Amino acid sequence: MCNAAIVKTSLLLHNCLSVHTRYSTMNNTFDWTLIRSFLAALEHGSLLGAAKALRSSQPTLGRHIAELESQLGTTLFERTGRGLLPTAMALRLADSARAMEAGAMQLARQAAGAQSKLAGSVRISASQPVACVLLPPLLAQMRVALPEITVELVVSNAVSNLLKREADIALRMVQPDQGSVIARRVGQVTISAYAHRDYLRRRGIPKQPADLLQHDLLSGDKDDTLERGAAAMGLPLPSERIVLRTDDLIAYNSALRAGLGVGFISDYIGRTDNCLVPLLPMLQIPPLPLWLVVHREIRSNQRIKAVYDFLGSHLPKVL
């Protein structure tokens, strides 16, 4: 092979250092896997050894070597009964191939570093009360701890579908049953009866659950939890006692703070307003578990993992 051909072959190998999987140079299309196979065969001295090292098969390695020889227009290995014997040209081109390998490894490390950098957006789904009351102080703390991460907050009382990537992380009151998600119980949400001080001055403080029959009450619209709970205690509620029905939890909390009547809210919400007075401590209202959920496949994403771990460690402290 003449010196010009050697120079051309070396240039082809050097030019393969590119950010693409396939490389087009001097009318030849190079595939990085061909170079990997060439180096493995050179190092191990046989197709079998090279195939084991690359977790491939002998026929595949054989095709790779044959294709590379065809593209370069030279023989790289002599096939002998003891394996592969590199030709002088193969040894001469080895340094260029190893330089390409080093470049590819550096490219992979840079890509891994970019993926592991704690920067970018994370999409979090939560209900209205959690998103509007519980999360904002935590997100402010997280902004200090993880300053290059931005949050996309999906505010909805519906359960976002992590499988369809509607969110990266979700806060839910029910434990998911999909096997492809990771759920961590971070605490429980306790619920109590509350009323504004102004309302209690006007109407008095209920001492027993039966006293609620004499008070104005706030209830859900399609959610009849209040009526069912009262009936279970033997206290069926007259319809005239319910002065507001709404399933919008922000509107519900606003009406409670305005002094419209007695309502039932999470204690983490009640604690945010000194004018709201907790009532009837003897009521046994079952707490709701709070689950922090992430899709299993994206648990290894470093920025999502960082947010998931931050919320997991801080949420229990504010419930």
Image (cartoon, rainbow, N blue to C red):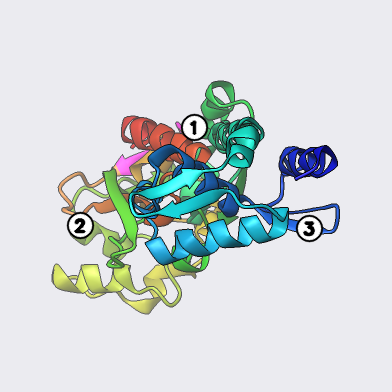
Front label number (1 vs 2)? 1
Say what amino acid the circle numbered 2 marks: Pro
Mark 3 → mark 2, Cα distance in angstroms: 84 Å
Q: Quadrant of the N terminus?
A: top right
**Inter-mark Cα distance, 1 to 3:** 56 Å
Q: Is residue 30 visible?
A: yes
In the picture provided, is 93 more to the left or to the right than 84? right
**Dot 1 corresponds to which residue?**
138
| Magenta stretch bounds | 274-278
* Secondary structure that dominates the magenta span: strand
- Quadrant in the picture for the C terminus: top left
Mark nearer the N terminus (3 vs 2)? 3
Q: Which residue is mark 2?
A: 209
Disc number for residue 28: 3
Q: Residue at x 85, y 58 (%)?
A: 27
User: 82 above or below 144?
Assistant: below
